[in-house]
Amino acid sequence: MKPITKTESPEYIQLSLAAAMTLGLRPGIFYRGAKLSCINLLLTYGNGCAGSCAYCGLQRQRRGRFNQRSFIRVEWPTFPLAEIAARMKKQEARIERVCISMVTRRSAVEDTLAVIRALKPLGKPVSVLMAPTILNQSQIRELKEAGAGIGSVAIDAATPELFRSLRGRGVRGPHRWERYWQCLGEAVDVFGWGKAGCHLIVGLGETETEMAQTVQRVVDLGANVHLFSFYPEEGSILEQRRPCPSGRFRRLQLAAYLIQNGFTTYDRLAFGDGGEVSGFGTSTAETDIVIESGIPFMTSGCPGRDGMAACTRPYGDGPPGDIRSYPFMPNMEDIVKIKMELGGK
């Protein structure tokens, strides 16, 4: 049996600042009335995560205690799982989903199963952001049998070269490109077509052509694409890198939405000399209608009761003054800004 400190999973778990605010565990209000309907949980250990991903706040080389490090640029406070469950029960009408993020530690598999079982009486849909390096397909089946309905994989980098340099051998990390894609395929096999997700981060050094290709690969595999815009994490290896240009992210948000929803395919996209998306393979009228809807530019995440993302991650990949993934329906002023960004760098 692994040694347990008083603030380790599964008895204790971290949750996002947005989730803590939603449950009344931290004070604060959301800019422009954004709402979070998904409680995002993160397993926590005294010896942290075995990964050393160059852009991640949880990388093992970063100074400070694991459960006191920022992640996605915000605090993830630690609370007893029992207290979080009790708060969720009181807020039942507001909570539509729970997402449990594993970290790369061998004990994380059993601990994730324990967390799923502890939360099962609440009757909320459960997503798991899986750690492929420590999982096999039979264990993925165990996650489903315990109560998880969606399994996601954070491949993040669009090319094997970037993956190796930022997550694998280039940073002395344990992760392997081939295993991550294999795990995503296993997730589709276990959870079903459209019940697996893939996180991809725009702005790690790929071209728009490469990211669009990767989006198509995910969709062809039967998984859903969840795009993030790179924003540097203080204290990470990439803390000095510039954020993803807004134009690049907007074009890829639109391309991903069109591919995911069957409006176009990668082969129908057009690209400029610099690899930027210059055409979407749809008519101007059709493209304009999709842009005007604002939906492609909202957070892409696991769904709530209405089919829209319950996991809105308010301002998770950009500050309120530079919204990348809108945690609410963009208004007309937002659409004007988005159209300007679509044509920018």
Image: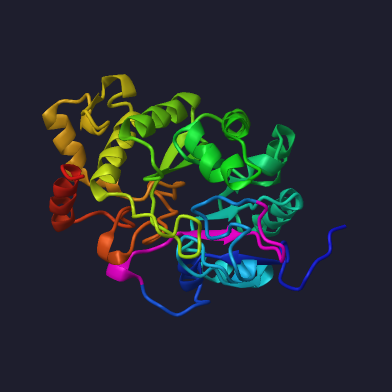
Q: State which quadrant residue 94 falls in.
A: bottom left
Front one among 217 and 100 = 217
Above/below status of 150 relative to 161: below
> Which residue reaches farthest right?
1
> Which residue reaches farthest bottom?
27
> Which residue reaches farthest top?
267
Front one among 273 and 132 = 273
128 left or right of 38 in image = right
Q: Position of residue 259 (x, y in %)?
A: 33, 29
27 left or right of 105 in image = left
Above/below status of 174 relative to 76: above
Main SS of the magenta part reads loop
> Which residues, given as a range, are shown in magenta?
30-50
Q: Position of residue 17 (x, y in %)?
A: 48, 69
Q: Residue at x 38, y 63 (%)?
A: 35
Q: Is residue 46 magenta?
A: yes
Q: Residue at x 15, y 26 (%)?
A: 283
